[in-house]
Image (tube, rainbow, N blue to C red):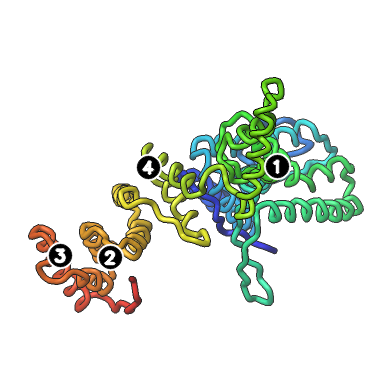
Amino acid sequence: MIIPWGTDAPIYHRPIATMGVIAVNVVLYLLVPGEATENLALTIGGGIHPLQWVVSNFLHSGIFELAGNMLFLWTFGLVVEGKIGGLRFVLIYLLMGTLLAGAMQCLVSSEQEVRLLGSSAVVFGLMGICLVWAPRNEVTCILWVRLTPIEFDLSILWFAAMYIALDVLSGGLSGVLRASLTNLSTRVIVAVELNHTFGALLGVLIGAGMLRFQWVDCENWDLLAVLQRRAGRPKGTETRTRKAKRPDRRLETPTSKASRRSEGRSSKGRSRGGPTSIEDASAVVLRAFRGHLEFEETEAALAVYKKARRAPVPWHPPEPDWRELIEALLRIQRHDDAVDVMRDYVREQPDPSPRVVLKLAQVLIQNQGRPQQAIKLLNRFPEGSLPPKLEEIRGRLRQRAEYLREEGPLELDEDLL
C-alpha cells in the first residue's frame, strides 16, 4: 500500500480545520463504544436516518482504517483548505459526506441490512478535488518493501488515477466474492464496493464547479489548464495571444501589408535567438509575492517565496520586500520559517542589514537554542563597527549566547552560513 503523508502544493491557509476534523475522528473513535458506533453507522436497508448521513463520516471500526483515512485526510485536506480556507473546507467535507451517505441510503435498497462506517468516501472526494485543482503538484509517499520504507514523490494526477483504478478493480473482485457468499443483490454490492469511487467523482464535480464559478484560484495550474497546455501562464495571457493572431483584414492597406512582411522578417531574425515570453517569470512571481504581502497574507507570500526558491535558478525578492517578509513572519511568530528566510537573506545580500543579522541571532538564541550559530553571526561585525545602540544589543546577545553555550545542552557545530 502506498501511503501519502505530505504535498508540495502551495498552502495559503493554515490547516486548522483539517487538524480539527482529524481530532474529531480520533476522539470519537476513542470515546464512542462499539455498540453505539454500530447504531450510528450508515444503514442500508433499514429505513431513512438523516443523522447517520453526517455522523457515519466521523466513525471508524478499526485503528488501521482510522490511521489510513487520517493520513489521506491530512494530505489532501492540506491542499483543499490551503486554497479556500477552513470554513469552506469544513462545509465541503460535510456536504460531500452528507450527499454520499444520503444518496446511498435513499437510492440503494436491500433486504438485508448493510452498515457502512468511515470517512474514506469523503477522503476520496477531497482527492478528486485535488485532482482538478492541483494535478501537477506532488504527493510525498511511503511504500513499505520488506519492512523497509521507501520514500518517493508522485503527482496528484497519477496518484489519484492509480487509487481510483485500484478501487474499481478491487471493488469488482470483492463484489464477485461477496455475491457468491451472501444474498445481497448486485446493485447493493456495486454501490458498497464503489463507494470510494463515487466520492472521487463527486469531488471532481465539486472541484470543477468551484473552478468554473471562480470560487477558487488555482493560478492556472488546474487540470483544465494542464490539458490545454497553458499551465502556469499569467491570467489574461491567452486572451491577448488569441487576439494578436487575428488582425483586422478590413483595415489593412498595401503599405501595412508590406510593413507586416518586414516585421515578419525581422521577427524571424529575432526568433533565432530563442522564443520571447509575454511576461518575465520573475516579474510574475514578484507581483504575486508583493500582492500577498500588501494584503497581509503572510502564509501565501511565504509559499510563493519557497516555490520560487526551488527553481533551477533560485529567485529572491528585492531587499525591502525581503525584509518585509521577515518582519511579517516574526509578527505571526513563525520563527522557524523566519530563520530560513533570514538565513537566505544574510547569505545572498552583499551588504545585509545589521538589524536582520542581530534579529537572526536573537531568534537562534531564544527560540531555537543554537547559541553557537548565533555567536558566529555576531562575530561577523568587527568591534565598534555598529552604531552604539546596535552594539549594545549585540553585546547582550553575545553574553546570553556564551552563557547558553556553557550551561545549555550540547549543540552540533553545523555551518549555518
Q: Amino acid at mark 1?
A: Gln
Q: Return the residue at label 1.
A: 228
Locate the N terminus and report the quarter of the image it occupies. bottom right
Question: What is the residue that sits farthest to the left in this orientation?
Answer: 388
Percent of width and height locating residue 264: 66, 41
Percent of width and height locating residue 353: 24, 58
Mark closest to the chain's N terminus, 4 or 3? 4
Q: Return the residue at label 3.
A: 394
Q: Disc 1 and disc 2: Cα gap in Å?
A: 47 Å
As rendered, which of 227 and 130 lies closer to the eye? 227
Circles 3 and 1, Cβ within 8 Å, touching? The answer is no
Mark closest to the chain's N terminus, 4 or 2? 4
Circles 1 and 4, Cβ within 8 Å, touching? The answer is no
Q: Disc 4 and disc 3: Cα gap in Å?
A: 29 Å
Circles 4 and 3, Cβ within 8 Å, touching? The answer is no
Q: Amino acid at mark 3?
A: Arg
Q: Return the residue at label 4.
A: 293
Q: Residues within 10 Å of mark 4 (few under 14, many from 20)?
A: some
Q: Return the residue at label 2.
A: 364
Q: Nearer the viewer, mark 3 or mark 1?
A: 1
Q: Residue at x 49, y 36 (%)?
A: 87
- The quadrant in which residue 111 appears is top right
